[in-house]
Image (cartoon, rainbow, N blue to C red):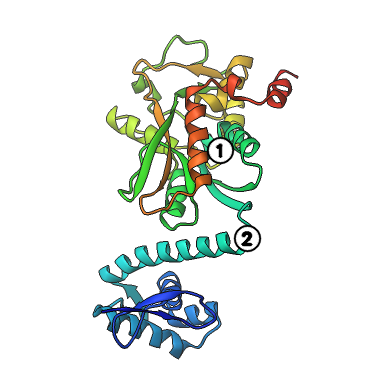
Amino acid sequence: MGKIVKSNQTHRIIAIDKGESAVTIRHLKVFIAVAQTGKMGAAAKELYISQPTVSQVISEIEEQYGVKLFERLSKKLYITKEGRQLLDYARHIIALFDEMERNLSYASTHHALRVGATITVGSCALPSIIRRFEERHPTVTTQVWVDNTQVIEGMILESRLDLALVEGEVASPDLIVRPVLEDELVLICGPCHPFAGRQSVALSELSGQDFILREPGSGTREVVDALLVTAEVQITPLWESTSTRSIINAVKENIGISILPYELVKNEIQSGAVAGLPLASPLPNRTCSIIHHRNKYLTPSAQAFIEVCQEYSNLSTESFQTEEERQSSTE
């Protein structure tokens, strides 16, 4: 029968002793470093320990579980199937441990919530959501990271974020997905483009057009690519950018056309800076969802943030805004 044993002072953690040895937080941190760097020497340098120590730690884990974690080929380390399985567990164990350390090291009234968002949500919805959340929970610090869908999903899977708002389909089965918002896409062109003023544009007319698109890996690009493939329309993007603002500015200058979320371009459409065009075959709406890892413990702060996101989906943007935001938007 296993017993509880204490590790050294550097890693204040307990481990289950299955016999003569035990896998500790220290073992898992060393293993993660080797998996991420692909070299024991690099892991040793990163952790400020010797390479023989790293090698010994990996051997102890392999002996404990009777599996091979890495294969060495041509002086390089390649993680095995069992190693990848352990890596997934190890990342979450370390994340939970670090979270425990943070929560126990600070006063109970001080918390940090790590929130991610894709670029569209981060530009449109997230500022109002964060403002409302912080009004209700002033002692919670929100740390925000905005990037494309692929990057944000990866950060959730690696436990570098607690929650995230993303658009489009979520690929990993390890993520819990809660739909929050509907996101409408629109075709835009410059005011001098031949499409401007048209009642509608057929999908076949998009072939050969100069497109300015979001980068591969973004939720918007995923939908656009799928739409064009289904319609058998081939294009070669003239520009690819992570910046929606640069895309809008390029469209204004008639450099090309684009497909973007309506919320990002509605002001430009309403002012006449760009033309918003319906397609003969309507563009599909996308669902914006809040996601977290299925093994993630949701703190009261995280649960409260989800509630604010759900409120946002039930209210119009105007009614959700604070008084200060409403006044600034009318100036």
Residue 310 x, y percent position in the rendering: 47, 31
- For the residue marked with disc 2, what is the amino acid? Tyr
Label 1 secondary element: helix
Q: Nearer the viewer, residue 246 or 320?
A: 320
Q: Is residue 86 visible?
A: yes
Report the residue that reaches farthest toward the right. 331
The answer to whether residue 80 is above or below residue 130 is below
Q: Which of 290 and 236 is in front in this view?
A: 290
Residue 193 x, y percent position in the rendering: 54, 19
Q: Residues within 10 Å of mark 1 (few under 14, many from 20)?
A: many
Q: Please give left or right for residue 328 compared with residue 148 in the image.
A: right
Q: Nearer the viewer, residue 84 or 134?
A: 134
Q: Which of 85 and 263 is in front in this view?
A: 85
Label whose residue precedes the other's in the sequence (2 or 1): 2
Q: Name the residue under label 2.
A: 106
Q: How far apart are marks 2 and 1 (CA)?
A: 29 Å
Q: How crowded is mark 2: few (under 14 residues within 10 Å), some or many (20 or more)?
A: few
The mark total stands at 2
Q: Please give left or right for residue 14 compared with residue 174 in the image.
A: right
Residue 14 x, y percent position in the rendering: 43, 75
Residue 78 x, y percent position in the rendering: 33, 74
- For the residue marked with disc 1, what is the amino acid? Gly
Q: Mark 1 points at which residue?
A: 122
The answer to whether residue 267 is above or below residue 72 is above
Quarter containing the C terminus: top right
Query: On the image, which quarter does residue 24 sit in?
Result: bottom left
The residue under the point 56% across, 25% down is 265
The residue under the point 30% across, 65% down is 85
The answer to whether residue 64 is above or below residue 240 is below
